[in-house]
Image: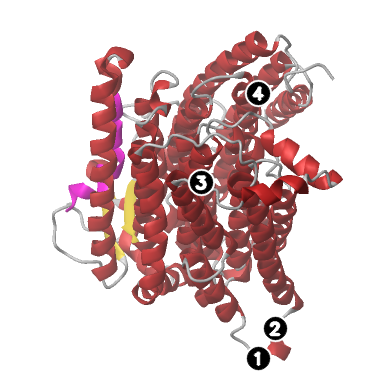
Amino acid sequence: MNNLMIAPVVLPLFAGAIMLALGGEQRRNISAALNIITSFALVAISIILLRAADVAPTGVAGVYRLGDWPAPFAIVLVVDRLATLMLLLTSLLAAAAAVFSLARWHRAGVLFHPLFQFMLMGINGAFLTGDLFNLFVFIEVLLAASYGLALHGSGSARVKAGLHYIAVNLVASLLFLIGVSLIYGVTGTLNMADLATRIPAIGAQDRGLLEAGAGILGIAFLVKAGMWPLCFWLPGTYAAAPPPVAAIFAVLTKVGAYIIIRLSLLLFGDGTGASAQFGDQLLLMGGMATVAFGAIGSLASQDMARLASFSVLVSSGTILATIGLGQVGVTGAALFYLISSTLGLGAFFLLIELVERDREPGADVLAVTRELYGDEDDSENSQETGIAIPATIGILGVAFISCALVISGMPPLSGFVAKFAILTTALGAPANELPLAIWIFLSLLIVSGLAALIAMTRAGIRSFWASPDRTIPRVRLIEMAPVAVLLLLCAIQTVEAGPIMRFMQATAQSLHAPHHYVRGVLDSPAKLNDSRGPT
Amino acid sequence: MEIVLAIGIGVLAGSGVWLLLRPRTFQVIIGLSLLSYAVNLFIVAMGRLKIDAAPILGSHAADNINGLPDPLPQALVLTAIVISFATTALFLVVLIASRGLTGTDHVDGREP
């Protein structure tokens, strides 16, 4: 159990290293097998850790001290509810994407499997680490691998989008470093739990510097989370990335959102002195602007991949705005939404490739333009009665409708439960006491669902109902199965909404009252297998 | 000492930002490099500047730990240098690939 805590970092590292040592292209099948085995092993490990964190009374399953140094002096990995939840989400998406890639995408370029594992290592490490600078290192690992994966398959569209993606993220990383060093300069520590204990005691003369550091750090993460106006790199990159990679990228924006959740509640939650609620207003406003931008963008999208990318923005904006509200119940609902929307978007990115396969490039642009100019040829409609819908199209259509339901938040799938939970928890107080910002946010939430529904209905009609002369895409089982499993998980999330929501609320409780986390890290026992609990 | 370092960081960061906003990929990469130098110097400065202090703990210096510079920012700078070097190299590859595929060195892949 104790050494299992570091397995989500070490396992992908070794798997990737072995794949590199195997020497790539001649032994791609071995790499592929290793990738699948590791991805599924990560799912199992995440589930074990999640259960351990859930039964632990403090919500912290354990603190892994690298090198066994006492906590504030060296790097620690902290396994708590939020971290294990994100680990499970990542590993589920990764397993689905890895299986999907076997059909053809892993042959589109070199070293797909090792890069995939290194990216998983970076993501898992970013979720687990309890040290700010170590977080930087893991983020760089995941970014470096993601640069390679975004360019997987090459082509001028990918290279062009990749160039912007890399430049923006390099600048964000530099901002990250400035923020980290400012915080270190003021507080003298990089351990997140130690920071939480020191920040209330920072004097008034240093507080400006501290808040500047935290703000710069926040900007670096908001770039990754895709908050408007820092999100213009996102649609192009995600739309150009190969589908299995784009499915994993759906989690990358959530890495930024995760760190914002973690740090803003740990360092600037209630009871942290003069800096409490630092940045909450900005998160709320920025999140709402992101939702609006994403909704408008998804209505304006002419192809499905861009539509999905703008949906990523809507999802990320919703989460950022709910963090800005700073209420326990809303945070719990937002975590439920995070899981549901990420699974739905992952499935959608995979599905798009299946639907759009064998279509002439630019068909969507033509379709939307035709719609705009009203150039419909109605005469053909009379002949269409009686054409049987092929089974493949039927299956794809059902999957598409499920994605649309999850993403737009319509019943009966989990997107509806998530949005409903956000609405009810945000409306907790009597109506005349609610601030205007909450009303605007709630209206935006509903309108963005409507926008997503309109955009996806239009895309669906264009792909599934129109053009009788279209070729039926050839879809293999291992391509359809990951999409089906991801959507099934959304369905399970709906059926089991009670227990899952209870877990999310427990997670939100421990996030808003981080003393268990802080004490768990700072009082972690001297030896890893020592059974002494936190004092 | 402080003013020299501050001006140095400012000049590097200013030139870096200006170059970053230029339309040619080569200017962007030089801008990123200059910015990362500025950030590295900034990290060192955050460990407080000390003049004439011993860089590392000697055998007889254990009694005077206050006279020593903070080793942690130096470790951070080393990591940051390695990482920015690696990512710059990677960016260079993408830059050349972009030049080869699009036939131009404009960041948008086409001449305006």
- According to the picture, the residue beneath numbered tag 3 turns out to be A250
Residue A116, percent from left and from top: 39, 32
- According to the picture, the residue beneath numbered tag 1 turns out to be A430
Establish if B48 lies above or below A29.
Answer: below
**CA distance for labels 2 and 1:** 7 Å
**Which secondary structure lies at badge 4?**
helix
Asked whether the viewer can see residue A216, the reply is: no
Looking at the image, do the residues carrying marks 1 and 3 touch, with CB atoms under 8 Å apart?
no
Q: Dot 3: within a 10 Å radius of its alpha carbon, few (fewer than 14), some, or many (20 or more) residues?
A: many
Could you tell me the amino acid type at mark 2? Leu
Asked whether the viewer can see residue A132, the reply is: yes
Looking at the image, do the residues carrying marks 2 and 1 touch, with CB atoms under 8 Å apart?
yes
Residue A431, percent from left and from top: 69, 89
- According to the picture, the residue beneath numbered tag 4 turns out to be A160
**Which secondary structure lies at badge 2?**
loop
The numbered mark at residue A217 is none
Residue positioned 42% across, 61% down in the render: A490
**Which secondary structure lies at badge 1?**
loop
